[in-house]
Amino acid sequence: DALKKMRQLDDKIIYMLNTILPTESFKGQADPTERCKDLYEQIQTGHKTRELAITRCLNASKEKVKQLKFERDNGNDSLQLLKALRKEQNTVRLLQAELNVEEVVKDHTVD
């Protein structure tokens, strides 16, 4: 949900461009170059923020997997531990997929 909200600007890029670029009758009232530059900076900031958030979560999840594997390798074969390990490994895969999605979103928005 948080990523979805953070990606709203990218999803509405066409609308944003249409609202910041003036029509013929309003060309003298706004500087389209400056407004486009501001929009670009907003988009770049959003990309960096999302990428950092995903990476931070991914690193925390990888650390948790490492800890759970250490416990398992030291003789704790409890079902609860194995379930937690599997769940955390799935979280790592999901977050890695989100990083890939973020790359696609960035490529589609900026290029």
Image: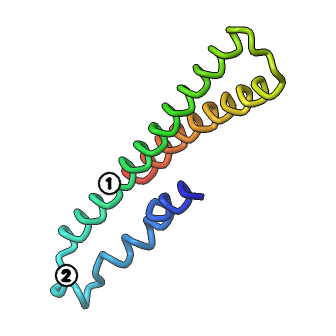
- Residue 78 location in percent, x, y? 81, 21
Name the residue located 50 percent from the left edge and 43 percent from the top edge. Answer: 104
Which numbered disc, 1 or 2, marks the residue that appears first in the sequence?
2
The image quadrant that residue 19 belongs to is bottom left
Is the residue 74 above or below the residue 6 in the image? above
Question: What scheme was used to colour the molecule?
Answer: rainbow
Q: Who is closer to the viewer here, 66 or 25? A: 66
61 and 97: which is toward the camera: 61
Q: Residues within 10 Å of mark 2 (few under 14, many from 20)?
A: few
Mark 1 neighbour density, 10 Å: few (under 14) some (14–19) many (20 or more): few
* Spatial separation of the CA atoms under disc 1 and disc 2: 23 Å
Residue at 28% x, 81% y: name it.
22
Q: Is residue 111 visible?
A: no
- What amino acid type is highlighted by mark number 1? Thr
Q: Which residue is mark 2?
A: 30
Q: From the viewer's perspective, is residue 43 above or below residue 51? A: below
Residue beneath disc 1: 45
The residue located at (51%, 33%) in the rendering is: 60
Helix, strand or loop status at disc 1? helix
Amino acid bearing label 2: Ala
Question: Viewed as shown, does residue 13 lie left or right of 34?
Answer: right
